[in-house]
Amino acid sequence: MIRRVRLENWRAYRHLDLHVDPGVTFLVAPNGVGKSSLLEAVRWALAPGPMADDPTVVRNGHTAAAATVTLTSERGELEVRREITLRGARSTSKFSAVLDGQTLQEEEVRGILSEAWSADLRFVSRTAFLTEDLRVEEDEPDLRSHLCSVYSLDELQRALEEIGPALRRANRGVSAARAELTATSEQLITARDERAAVENRLESARSAVSAARQRLADSQGASERASAAARLQAAAAIWDDRNVAFRREVEEVVGMPPQDAPLEQVLNQVKQSVRDGVESARAEQAQLKARLEAVEEAIARLHEAGGECPVCLRELDDESRGRAEHLHLQDLADVRQRLEVIDPHPLVQRLNDVETLERRVAALGERPSVESVEESDLLGIDAATALADLERAAAALRELEIAAQRAEERIEQISGELEEAELLKRRYREVALLDAAEKALNSTISSVLGEQLAPLTSEVNRRWQSVFPDRPNLNVLPDGTMSRDAGGAVLAFAAFSAGEKMVAKLMMRLTTLLVTTKVPFCWVDEPLEHLDPPSRHLVGSMLAHLSTASGLEQIFVTTYEEPLARRLAEFQPGRVRVEYLRTEHVS
């Protein structure tokens, strides 16, 4: 049970320290003072819910706010504190708790309170408190999950929660597959026949390409051979022209036509003849020079010897000496005359000319051998025509290859769709099984909860009729949804008036707390708004008398209806109290 609430810089509160007693407490204050903020802070401290990091709860001019709630339980006094701190545009929250001097983590506190109250804290936050945000919401606490926990149906509920997404996924898969699968076995047979026909045409097309490629190669080869032969013929003609020119030059050097003998042979014979002449002239010239030197030396010795013969050393008379000298001079003149006639230089020049011409003839080389080109039809085939034929054959082959690829893709697509069709059958079976399981689980849970919920619904309806006797039959479903009968039709909760919604929410919460939990308190914000005076009195009286019921030890009600609150406190002194929240609380 809640015994104390302390607030620091929480919305309009600078500081608040409020002690709360058992029984029924009516907290009276004018509108705008902060009654709703007080309940909001207590609810946030125990379980943040959607207010985890709401920076608007921090009082203007401050950077942090805190709410501390002290509870009593069988395990001792538990103090829970939650603080929110602003850091620029961001906010962070911090939790702390102490149980009889021992520090606890938030998860430990959740476990202790959930065990003590037999309810999850999120469910308690939406059931044991009826704050302003809960009063305007259409959704109610998840009563179904809570009742499943109370009546040990958790495993069935968890199984149902797992089946739901699986069933939705399976249904989406079935819908998508059903929309996409259009293939049939007949289509697969047709596609395979088309692929076989294309493959047959492909073989012919490949053969046509090979033949066209061979014709092009043969045409190009024949053309190249003809070109080579033409080049050889042209080279042979050039060789013949140069050979004729060389023969004319040889004729000029030799002095006579070289007949039909090869030029190399003719030039070699001439060169050898000229070379022999050069050597002979040089040998004769050397002999004549030696003879010239001997004659000159003999004449000299003849003059030096006086009257003696330089050979036999006998005395010579004048006639003999004169005759000898005459003979020597005559011989000297003959030698000199012969030396003037013998000159090897022209023969050497001629030898050089012959050798030069021989080298040029040797450079000419052999006459190119001209091969005859066999007559062939290929010589008449234009290579461009053969190339065009090959290109057309290759294009036709490429088209057939693309058609074969498309045919294969079509077969794969149809085969895949047929496989998907088999998978679709399995999915249909899966959907059927999941759907049957979901219906069975729902039926089981609804049956059990319907039986267990009947007393709760009856009690809620009884309390509802005590306020609205002219509007009977308030229905409560396991998920917390409420409706009522209206002239034989079902009136949805959204069509309730503001007062009806408030009373219905309050009755459902009070009854749920009493019947299905061990939560010892209920804090309600402005339950008397939107009600006419008789209904306000009935609701206020019911709240005042609830403190005597087993289970609810504390009921805390905020209101601005001070006269009604004072009258109810006078009827039950000690059990019903009136507290005033004045402006000094929020100063």
Image (cartoon, rainbow, N blue to C red):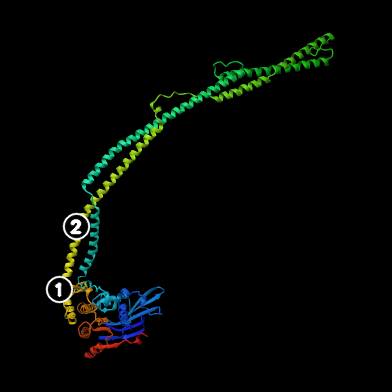
Amino acid type at image mark 2: Arg
**Which label lies toward us, 1 or 2?**
1
- The reply, left or right, for residue 5 in relation to residue 319 is left
Q: In this view, does 114 lie above or below 185?
A: below
The label on residue 429 is: 2
- The reply, left or right, for residue 6 in relation to residue 351 is left
**Quadrant in the picture for residue 535:** bottom left
- The reply, left or right, for residue 264 in relation to residue 62 is right
Residue bearing mark 1: 488
Residue 560 in view here: yes
Determine the secondary structure under disc 2: helix
Amino acid type at image mark 1: Gly
Determine the secondary structure under disc 1: loop
Q: In this view, does 383 lie above or below 466?
A: above
The quadrant the C terminus occupies is bottom left
Find residue 78 and report its horizontal and vertical position in percent. 30, 81
Q: In this view, does 337 lie above or below 110?
A: above
Q: Which residue is drawn at 22% across and 76% down?
A: 496
